[in-house]
Image (spheres, grey):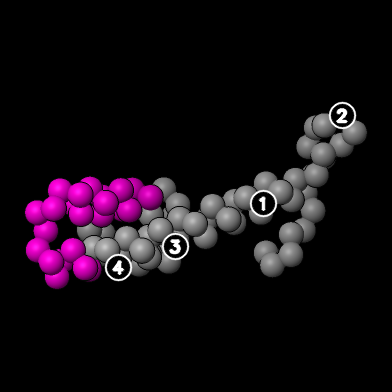
């Protein structure tokens, strides 16, 4: 398990760490206390992934298209 704080992880790092946590929990060979810690970390990682995806969706939604359907620039998105 990485010692890097979740809030400093990129989407890809958080997703890889989440997959590792899920793999450990699915194996079922982790003691109960460690399972609880893994579950809590997994919840943090899931939240980080969701936040990064939402951020990306908002950036994509801000792309403006011209009459021909081609991107012409971007417009500010509230909250970013």
Determine whether the residue tagged by mark 3 lies in a helix, strand or loop: helix
Counting residues from the start of the chain, the first of labels 4 and 3 encountered is 4
Q: Are marks 4 and 2 in contact (CB under 8 Å)?
A: no
Q: Is residue 43 visible?
A: yes
Give the alpha-carbon distance from disc 4 to disc 3, as whole Å: 11 Å
Which residue is pictured at 66% across the width and 54% down the height? 58
Instruction: Tell me the tag on residue 68.
Output: 2
Give the alpha-carbon distance from disc 4 to disc 1, as whole Å: 29 Å
Looking at this view, name the residue that lies furthest to the top.
68
Density class for disc 4 (Cα within 10 Å; few <14, some 14-19, many ≥20) is few
Counting residues from the start of the chain, the first of labels 3 and 2 encountered is 3
Using the image, determine if residue 39 lies above or below residue 68.
below
Image location of residue 37, percent across then percent down:
22, 68
Counting residues from the start of the chain, the first of labels 4 and 2 encountered is 4
Closer to the observer: label 4 or label 1?
4
**Is residue 9 shown left or right of residue 25?**
right
Counting residues from the start of the chain, the first of labels 4 and 1 encountered is 4
Whether the magenta-drawn stretch holds residue 17 is answered as yes
Task: Give the quarter of the figure containing the C terminus.
Answer: bottom right
Task: Give the quarter of the figure containing the N terminus.
Answer: bottom left
* Residue placed under numbered mark 1 in the picture: 59
* Residue placed under numbered mark 3 in the picture: 47
Q: Which residues lie in the magenta part?
A: 15-37
**Is residue 42 shown left or right of residue 46?**
left
Instruction: Tell me the tag on residue 40.
Output: 4
Density class for disc 1 (Cα within 10 Å; few <14, some 14-19, many ≥20) is some
Instruction: Tell me the tag on residue 3.
Output: none
């Amino acid at each position: 398990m990485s010692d890097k704080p979740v809030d400093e992880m990129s989407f890809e790092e958080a997703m890889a760490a989440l997959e590792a946590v899920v793999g450990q929990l699915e194996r079922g060979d982790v003691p109960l206390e460690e399972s609880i810690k893994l579950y809590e970390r997994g919840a943090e990682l899931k939240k980080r992934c969701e936040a990064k995806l939402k951020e990306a969706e908002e950036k994509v939604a801000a792309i403006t298209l011209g009459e021909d359907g081609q991107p012409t620039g971007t417009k500010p998105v509230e909250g970013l």
